Image (tube, rainbow, N blue to C red):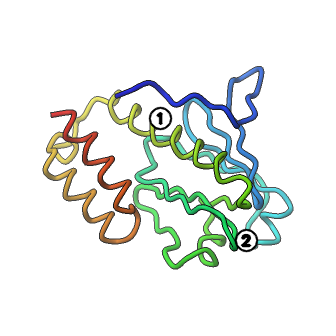
């Protein structure tokens, strides 16, 4: 595994080193333990959800969906183990509590966030001691990735990248 992507577009907290990515309906904060989704007044109005923060450990994230902004807003959506995320486009995704939307001018910033999250998720998986047979069996893991692709959770590019990483561990 190569080194972590260098953050160039995030705001870095001087005390903690956390990386802040400001979106339209909320913010993503990348900590050393996980991703914090922060909501303010726009999140309350757009999603009818509570204001505040939700911390998601890297080991709970199974996929990161990224949709570039253009005519419509873009979004980054975190798919969680055992969770059910919105799967029917931007309107439904905007109501998902694990999604942050952004304007097209922030495409590069949130693509950077996606790359860092993916790196940290993979690093966390590699650091964990695998006690479950499912995790120890690369064929079962590959089947799981294919199912996520078939369900639309992973796009083809994400599936191929995860497959390459998995095969590289053999």
**Marks 1 and 2 close (CB-CB < 8 Å):** no
- Pick the front one: 164 or 92: 164
Residue at horizontal 46%, vertical 68%? 84
Q: Nearer the viewer, mark 1 or mark 2?
A: 1
Tag 2 or tag 1, which sits nearer the N-term? 2
Compared with residue 3, is residue 109 higher up or lower down, i.e. above or below?
Answer: below
Answer with the quarter of the image where residue 13 lies.
top right
Q: Which residue is mark 1?
A: 120
Compared with residue 125, is residue 54 higher up or lower down, i.e. above or below?
Answer: below
Q: Residues within 10 Å of mark 2 (few under 14, many from 20)?
A: some
Residue at horizontal 66%, vertical 70%? 94
Pick out the residue farthest to the right. 41
Q: Which residue is mark 2?
A: 47
Residue at horizontal 21%, vertical 33%? 169
Answer with the quarter of the image where residue 77 lies.
bottom right
Residue 45 x %, y %: 82, 71
Pick out the residue farthest to the top. 15
Residue at horizontal 21%, vertical 50%? 141
- Pick the front one: 169 or 97: 169
């Amino acid at each position: 595994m190569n080194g972590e992507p260098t953050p160039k577009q995030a705001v870095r907290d001087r005390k903690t080193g956390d990386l802040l990515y400001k979106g339209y309906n909320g913010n993503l904060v990348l900590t050393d333990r996980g991703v914090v989704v922060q909501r303010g007044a726009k999140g309350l109005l757009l999603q009818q959800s509570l204001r505040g923060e939700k911390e998601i450990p890297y080991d709970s994230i199974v996929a990161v969906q990224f949709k570039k902004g253009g005519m419509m807003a873009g979004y980054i959506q975190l798919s969680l183990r055992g969770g059910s995320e919105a799967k029917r486009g931007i309107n439904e995704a905007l109501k998902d509590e694990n999604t942050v939307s952004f304007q097209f001018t922030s495409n590069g910033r949130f693509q950077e966030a996606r790359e860092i999250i993916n790196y940290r998720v993979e690093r966390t998986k590699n650091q964990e001691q695998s006690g479950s047979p499912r995790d120890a069996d690369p064929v079962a893991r590959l089947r799981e990735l294919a199912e996520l692709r078939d369900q639309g959770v992973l796009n083809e590019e994400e599936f191929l990248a995860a497959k390459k990483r998995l095969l590289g561990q053999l």
